[in-house]
Every structure is written in structure tokens, then in C-alpha cells.
Amino acid sequence: MSTSIADALNTLSAGLILISAFAMVATRQVQGVLRFFVAQSVLLAASSFLLAYSRASVHLWALGAITIIAKVLAIPWVLRRLLPAEFYERREIAQAVNIPTSLLLALMLTVVAEFLMGPIVAATHDPVIRVNLPIGLAGILIGAYSLVARREAIPQLIGILAMENGAFFAGVAISPELPLIAELAVAVDVVLIAVVVGLLTRNIRETVGTTEAAALDKLKEEASA
Amino acid sequence: MTLIVILALPLLAALLSSIRPLRLYASAITIVSTSACFALALYVSAQVIERGRVVALPGWFEADGLSALMLVLVSFVVALASVFARGYMQHGHDERRLWWFYGNYNLLVFALLAVPSLAEPNLVWVAVELITLFSVLLVGFDNTSNALEAAWKFAVLTIMGAPIALLGFFLLFWTYRSTTGGAWETWEGLRAVAASMDPNLLKLSFLLVFVGFGAKTGLAPMHTWLPDAHSQAPTPVCAVLSGVKTTVPLYVILRFLSIVLASPAARVGNWMIALGLVSVGIAAFLLIQVRDYKRMFAFSTVEHMGIILTAAGMATQAADFGAVSQILNHAITKSLCFYVAGAMLLILSTREIASVRGLFRVSPFAGGALVLCSLAIAGAPPFPIFLSELSILSAGVHAGHKLVVAVLGVLIVIAFVAILSHVNRMVMGEPGAQVSAGVLPTTCRFTVWAAAVPVVLLGVYVPAPVHNLLQLAAHQLGGR
């Protein structure tokens, strides 16, 4: 496999990662959102394996393996252990913004990401960086948007984790020689996010009786607290 | 070596307090380990004052003036808070769950101390993220619907900042590596080569880190989680969160700022001044309409973060000295405020300002302490915050930012009047008939006294070592 084929395949996985980010925005069912997140993580790992091969980088092999262990295996396992199955079968009826509008906004965010990263990628000739930086930023922005638009706790959590995927997709291109300990620590951190937010969600469901984030609006200045 | 021991102690304490036979002693274990950390942090800063820099493991664990200052502040606040917790947490909390509280608390202490001790920026990102994760469960520890709501908002808003900041760290790493040809990344190394790094990349990475960690610091407009979390968490946790947990991410922003300032092509100082003023302004006006006294102290934290950012944005040596003094004074004064608020909560069992009247009559101790800490936090003379705010304002005049100084001065006065009018309402007058004074545990009383000592002392006399440490710390901010 020559470098140019590896780069072309990397561009393909970049496209698929972007599509999975859109799919997460467009999916109502909690289970579906989780599946698209896992798919996106697999693509992220595939992309780092491809780059590891074409650049002969041990770090990127390790990063791909860490991504598989943390995001494809550990996070879904943790969430399933912490939360009962009925969570995942739930469909979100009330979203803040309807899905076609959400998709249009996600498209706009992608354009914004391309625009913001334009001057920076213009200075480099590395085709991988030119693809990964804007797509990574788009992943972060779309994840942040889905946090605003989603009403259920678990899709919000997955939005955060998808943002993390976006940052890493940019990271594999621009900082492949990151110290291994930092990569490991980040992976542990991502799993910890799932544990902590999962635990919190469970406590909220037991105490408040719902996991709709919109129901959490007691604390503010104006109305009686 | 001492630096590594400082980090190992809280981890050991977390482990010990979760071992079943030792769970009953979790509180004592925590007090011992955090006090030992404080003593060691003092030792480290003495060494830093002597030699300028302490290196435990080159490229990994290093401390300069700014780190030493943060280490001392964090360990001071967590040590006193753990003493306060001993008495406070016995009221209304299930004793069988307390070991879990202390285990989590020690992990939070570890993460807070790790941020200033680490020299490698990417690991610092991880440590900042761990701070958030370990504090989320402490905020929701009471398991009431309000506490869980606060914890949820806190988790979503602050964890969301992390990936944004992460991209900023990656970009910084990239530009550093391509500038130096693959050197090991440290804060010191970054500042040394900042002038030759690509200014566009540097600015973009700073912007991302600023947005991401600004949310964790509680800078407006990403401050909305802060009053919720800082009012609903158990009081010892509030003291830690408001006193030092906000300034630790700010410490990272300031480190980044010093790198950006070292690059002449990337000018961000005026943006920092503007954004700092926005935080101060929003906090000052929200302070007027606040209804809960713990939220009142929380909004004053937003105000102080804005002041520190404004001062750092001025980027002169005098303003930097004001900024680090404000970090110090904020930490000691704000933690005192929350101990007092916790004592009031134990005595009155209400958080509402409107239902507290005649606190002087109900409890002269709490009333007196409330007046003292409110004057100190609002910035009345002769308290230390007055001195640091004054030095920031005068540094601003010298740097030619007259308009900024005028706006900042007016906003500080608004916040001052707002805080003191609320406090006046609470301490004066006749107590309502239904008030039944609760008993204040000895440890809580002791903590209030102990925390008040530096607040009173530093206002009238700054010992030479403290002054030297502040100067070393200010030097790291890179003002000219």
C-alpha cells in the first residue's frame, strides 16, 4: 500500500467520520446514537492505524489500540452496566430543534470549521493535516451543538464524547508524537467521563425521576429557588 | 523529590480511606495527609525562593514561582477544608457514605496539586480534566434534586470545555514540535521559543484553550454552572471549588497567556482585558439580585476571576504582581467566606438571604465572622483584597488603560455595595421568632478562626517570603 492510497483512505474515513457526526444529530433513539458513536470511534481508530502504517509511527499504532479499547469496548460496556436497558430504547420526542433544521445547522458548522482552519492548513502541504484539522474541528462543533439541542442525558454525554473524537481526529494528524503517557491518560479520562456522567445520570433518575435535562431548571436567580 | 511526595500523599490517603477497616478514620487520614501536603508545599516554595526553580523529574515534575504559589494555596485551602469537613459532614450525612466522600475528596486534592507540579502541558490538560470529574460527584454528594441539578450543569458545561481545549493543546504541541524540531514540550521551553512560533497557530490554540478552560474557571459567559455548583455542594467542597478550583484552570490560561505574550506578533492582551471586564460586570450586577448567601459568594468568585484576567491582560510587571496577589488573596478570603457560610447554614438551616435577620443576636460568632469575611471579600481596607485590587488599578493607570481602570473601579464599587447591603440585612435587626440556633461543631469554629488569621494578617503586613514568592510568580506571567 503506497502512501497516496493510505492518504486517500484517510480522506475516506474523514468523510465517514463527518457523516457519523451528522447521523448522531439526526438519530432520535438513544441506542442509535450510541451505535453511531461506536462506529465513529472505529473509524477514528482505523484512521490512526492507516497513518501509523504510512508514517511507520509506533505512537499511532498505540493510539489506535487505545481508542479501540477505551471508546469501542470500555465506554459502551460502562454505560450498559450503569444504566438499565430501558434507557437505550427510549426515543427523544421533544428536541429543542427539529432534525432537518439541526442537520442544516450542522452543515453550517462544518463550513465554519473549514473557514476557521483555512488559513492554518493553507500553510502546510501535508494532505492528511489538510483533511483532518477542519474535519476534527467540525466534529467538535457538531458535538457541542448536539449538547445544546439534545434533551436526554445520555445523548448529551455522547455529544461530549463525540467532541473528544473530533479533537483526536485532528490530533492524529498534527501531534502524532504525543507522549504515550499523555495518550493513555486521555483515554482513561474519557472512560472516567462515561463513568462519572453515567453515575450522575443514574442518581438523577432515582432522585428526580426523569433524565430529561430540561427538567433540571430549579436553580436560578429570578424565580424563587 | 518533595514534589512527587506531595502528589503521592493524596493518592495514598484516597486508597487508605477506602479500605474497609480504615473507613471510620477517613476524616483523620485526610486531615493528616492534606496538612502534610501543606507543610511540604511550604518547603517547596522555600526552595523555589532560594533557587528560583525546583526540579523533581526534569520535563515532568517541576515547580517555579507560579507553581509554588499555587501549590501553597491549594494545599492550604484543602487542609483547612478537611478540618471543617470533620465537623460539618457529621450533620445530616450518612456516616457509612462518608468514606466515599473523603476518598473522592483526596482524589480531587491530587488532581488540584498535579496541575501546578506538572511541566508537560498535555498532562496538565489531563489533570485539569480530572479535577472536573472528581468534583462533579462531590457537588452531587447530597443527592437532593437541587444538588444533582447543579452537578449535571457543572458536568456538562465544564466537561464540554475539555475537548475544545484539547484541540488547542494539540495545535500548540504541533507548532512547538515543528519550531524546535522535536524537543520535549514544557512550559519553560514553550516560552523560550514562543517568539519564533507561527503567531496564527499560537493565537488559535490560545483561543481554544481560553474557551475550554474559561468555562472551567467560570468566566462569563460560561459562568452559569458556577453559582449552582458552589451553592449546592457540601460547604467544605464549596470552599475548595471557589477558593482554588477556579484559579487552577485560570493558572493554565495564564501560563498560555505568558507564551502568547512572548510572541510579539500575537497580541491578545486587550481581548483579555475586555473579557475580564465582562465577567466582572456580569457578576457585579448579578450580585445585586442574588437571593442565597452561598450564591452571593459564588458570584463574587466570578468577579474576582474577571479582575485577575483583566490584570493579566494589561501585561505589565506591576499588573502581573497585582494579578498573582489577587489569586492569593482570593484563595484565602473566599475559602474563609465559605467556612462562615457553612457555619451559618449549620446554625440557621437556611440559605436564603431574606429569611436571615439579626444574625448578631442569634450567634455573635457567626455574625462577626460574616461581617469580617464580607468586608474582606468585597475589598474593604485594611484587608488584602483591597491592597491587590488597588495595585491592579494603579498598574492600569501606569499602563495607560485609564478607561479600563475607571470601568473596573465602578464595577468593583457596585459589587462592594451589593455584598455589604445583603450582609447588612442579614446581621442587623431582630431575629425572626422561628429561628432556632443549631450547635456549631468545634472543628468548624476552629477552621473559621484559623482561616481568618492570614486574611487579617496579610492586610497589614506581608512577610518577606510571601512577597518574594509573589514576585517570582508574577515574573512567570511575562509582563514587561
Image (cartoon, grey):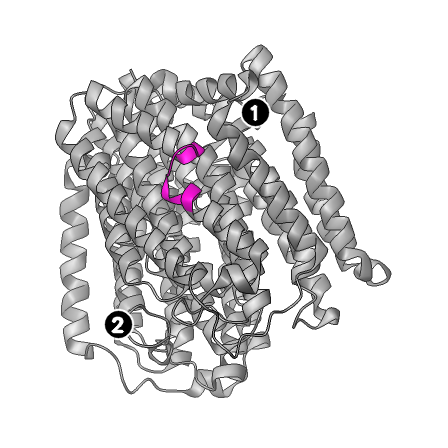
Q: Does the magenta stretch include residue B379?
A: yes
Q: What residue is drawn where x is 23% and y is 77%?
A: A96
Q: What element carries label 2?
A: helix
Marker count (numbered)? 2
Chain of the residue under label 2:
A
Residue B116 located left or right of residue B97: left
Residue where numbered disc 1 is placed: B62
Q: What stretch is highlighted in magenta?
A: B375-385
Residue A23 lies, with reference to residue B265, above or below; the image says below
- Within 10 Å of the Cα at label 2, are there few (<14), some (14-19), or many (20+) other Cα atoms? some
Q: Element type at marker 1?
A: strand
Q: Which amino acid does label 2 sit on?
A: Ala
Q: Distance between the residues labelled 2 and 1?
A: 43 Å
Residue for badge 2: A149
In which image quadrant can residue B324 be found?
A: top left
Q: Which chain carries label 1?
A: B
Q: Is residue A1 visible?
A: no
| CB contact under 8 Å: marks 2 and 1 | no
Q: Is residue B463 above or below residue A48?
A: above
Q: In this view, does B103 lie to the left or right of A47?
A: right
Q: Where is residue B132 in the image (x, y as percent from the top left)?
A: 49, 53
Residue B239 visible in the shown view: yes
> Dividing the image into 4 quarters, which one contains the N terminus of chain A?
top left
Residue B299 at x, y = what percent? 35, 54
The answer to whether residue B142 is above or below residue B408 is: below
Discs 2 and 1 share one subunit? no
